[in-house]
Structures are given as C-alpha cells and as structure tokens.
Amino acid sequence: MKKPSLLFSLIPVIFLVALLIINVLIFKDEASYGPNQVALLLGALIAGFISFLKYDIKFADIEEGINKATSNALSAMIILIVIGALIGTWILSGTVPAMIYYGLKIITPEIFLPVTCIACAVVSLSTGSSWSTSGTIGIALIGIGEALGFSPGLVAGAIISGAYFGDKMSPLSDTTNLAAAMAETDLFTHIKHMIFTTGPAIIVALILFTIMGFTSTPAAVETEHISQLLTVLDQNFNISIWAFIPPALVLFMVRKKIPALPAITVGILGAIVVACIFQHDLILEKMGGEFSLKNLYEVIISISFRGFQIESGHKIIDKLLNRGGMEGMLTTVWLIFSAMVFGGALEATGMLQVIAASILKAVKGTGSLIGATLGSCIFLNATASDQYLAIVVSGRMFKKAYSDYNLAPQNLSRALEDAGTVTSVLFPWNSGGAYNSSVLGVPTIVYAPYCFFNILSPLISAFYGAFKIGLTEAKENSYQ
C-alpha cells in the first residue's frame, strides 16, 4: 500500500475540524447530538475517497479497518447502554436523591466553595455526567453563591472542578469508558491509575477553594434555595442511608476486581431491591396506585430503558432527576461509533500513522511522549471542539508508541483523561465550554481561571511524566 503524504493525510482532519467548529457555532451545545456525528462520518468518507483516488487503496481494506476500530469500542458502548439503566434505577432507589440531599445539608457560608465542589463531585460520580451536574444542581449553587456574595466565576469554577472530577473518576462516565477503550485497558484499572494525578489535583483545588471561602466576606446567607430542594426531595423520596447500598455494592465488586459489566449489573439489581423496600410509595404511585407483579415489572423495565421521570413541581429537581435509561445513552453511543469510524478510516488508509509519525519525531522519551499526548488532547479540544474526538484521535495516534516505550495501557488512558476530558470546558467554542457557559450563565473566560482541577490535571500529569513518577511498565500481552 502506497504511503499517503502528510499534506493529504491532514485534509480529512482539517475538513473535520472546520465542520466541528461550524457545528458548534450553529448548533452550540446541541452539536454532539447529531451534527458532530455527521461531520465524523463525512470526514471518514473524505479520507476514503482521497485514499482510493490518489493512492489506489481499496474500499474493502478501509471497511476492514473501520470494522476493527468499532469492534474495539463495542464493550464500552455496551457498558454505556447498561449504565443508562443503572442511572434510572439509582434515582428510583433514592440513591442519587440521597447523595444530593446529604450534600446540600452540610452547606454553610464559610465552607460553601469546597462543599460546592464536593457536592458536584458526588453527584457527578454517582451519575457519570458532568453536564447534567452543571445544568441542574450547578444552577442552584450559582444562585446560592450569588446570594452569599461570591463571584459567579468563582462559584462556577468550583462547580465545574467538582463535576469534572466526578465525571473523570466515575465508572458510569462515557469519557472514562471511552479512554479505557481507546487504550485497550480494563475500566477499573484505568480509574485506579488516575488516582495518582487526579487525587493531588482535586486536593489542591479544594485547598484553594477553602482558602478563598474563608478569606471572602459573603453577605447574609439566603437558605431558601437549599430549603426548597431539601423539602422537595424529602417529599418525593424516602431519604435514608440505606439508599447508599447500591453504590456500596458496586464499590465492593470493584474491590474484588470484578469486571465492569457484572459490577454495574449488580448495582442495578441492588437498586431495584432497595427501591422495592424503601421507595414502595413512589413505586406504587408510578403503578397508578394498583400493585401487581405485572405493574412492578413494567415500572422497573420502563425506567431501565426510558429513564426516570418525576413531576415534583420544582424545575431544578425535575431537570436533575428526569434522566437515565438505555435510550438516553444512544446519542453518546452514536457519537463514539462515528468517532471510531473516522479513526478507523484514518488508520486503515495510513493517514493516522503519517500524522502520528510527524508528531512522534519530537518524542525522545517517556516524558515527552506523555507531554505529546497531553498536548495533542488540548490541541484537539481547542481546534476540533469536542472532547470525544480529542480522546479518540489521540488514543489511536499514541497507542503503539506507549507499547514501544514499554508503558502499560493505563498510562495512555490516564493521559487522555488528564487532558482530553477536563480541558474541553476551558474553550468557549468547545461543546463543553459552550454548554457550561450557557447553563451557568457565566462566560467561559470568567470561570476558566477558577477551574483549578481542570487546569491542574494536565500540569500534574506532565510533571509526573517528566520525572517518571507513577508510571506502570507494560506486562506481556498488555497491548493487543
């Protein structure tokens, strides 16, 4: 097969970047719900046509490469679909409402900023979604922060730092699953390895938020927002510590090194049992007041594939809890699939290898390799405007190099998350930045300096890479 030139290899990438930027400008935070998928597929077609017409590469070979790429992400897509059921059942069981309830209970003016960060981290960790956290509880916390006298940018920084920490460390997160899939490493091995960089980043962020909280002079506290949220949650759910049984089961399974899919399944089954015991009034209401095994089955299955729905009369609570379900994950699965088609096409045509080779020429060791990975993710977030693409393209570009340098796959997946996931929110034209700026009502340029966790994560990762701290050597057959 004739090797494509760097110029022609960059054409599909430039074409894709242009389309993604246009999509963000036109569709804004809706760009990842269809337009970006179309752009990725068109980018794959451009790569295919150039390779066929210019380099006489057969479409059958390109299709084979695409099939291989999509099959590598199949397990992650299956997990994401199952996670949709888990989110719905965890809301039904009162697990997510209890996490929100107890998180809001402990808020006081002096510790408002660190508690905001922690509360958002807990919600995001339990749901696997930073966007849902920012767009729901984040809205309430912005209002409370302003009532306390804190600047909106500072409060938004605390919200986003916590939300992205939870998203990054949650086995329910699509980006966490995607990064693990790109590096071909186990999900929970990936999460454990991220503790080395993610732990210090969130600790330093919390220290900074605590210092700022105690040195500020906020106005008299306005507790009406909190009281309303707590009252509505208490009225609609039986809030108790028993609601934490499902996540405890998942954590136990993780500790026993059980694979992600069965661990998540146990979390779903545990949530169903907890819901039947402690949320029987809510379930009876959803059954129309008439209990039967048929109605119970219908409620559980409906929530598993359609998600949880509630009409509490409180807009924020309804927006926060009306989510989950398998069908709610299909857009993300579609985006991942489309990204894999694009990546597979670039790899099958040899274009990805040409681009990677030009970048890897500057790599002289493990430190510069990790730095190049981080830089690539940030560059793609700044130009391609999508964190999924940053993870997918960078993962496919650098996977072989990590194997050549005898670095375990989890080193790659960690670098992808340290820069690919968390820096997307720092660019106004990125889907992450556009969304958070819109829902929180704070311009990206205003909150970005206070997103301490998002800024520190790639810096700490680069420092570790430069001094070879927290790196794991590859074992035999680590890469397939």
Image: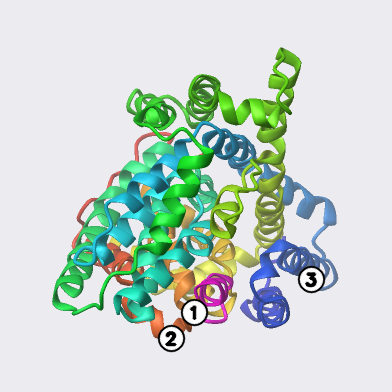
Q: Position of residue 368 (x, y in %)?
A: 32, 68
Residue at image position (40%, 26%) is: 245
Secondary-structure class at tag 2:
helix
Near-viewer residue (147 or 50)? 147
Identify residue type, mark 1: Phe
In terms of image quadrants, where is residue 18? bottom right
**Splitting the image into 4 quarters, where does residue 4 fall?**
bottom right
Residue marked by disc 3: 46
Q: Of circles 1 and 3, which is in front?
A: 1
Q: Which residue is mark 1?
A: 427
Q: Secondary structure at mark 3?
A: helix
SS state under label 1: loop
Q: Main secondary structure of the magenta part?
A: helix
* Mark 2, residue position: 445
Q: Which residues are magenta?
A: 428-440
In the displayed structure, 189 sits above or below 201; it is: above
Horizontal and vertical percent for residue 360? 44, 69
Tell me the mark number nearer the camera, choosing from 3 and 2: 2
Are the residues tagged 3 and 2 within 8 Å (C-beta)? no
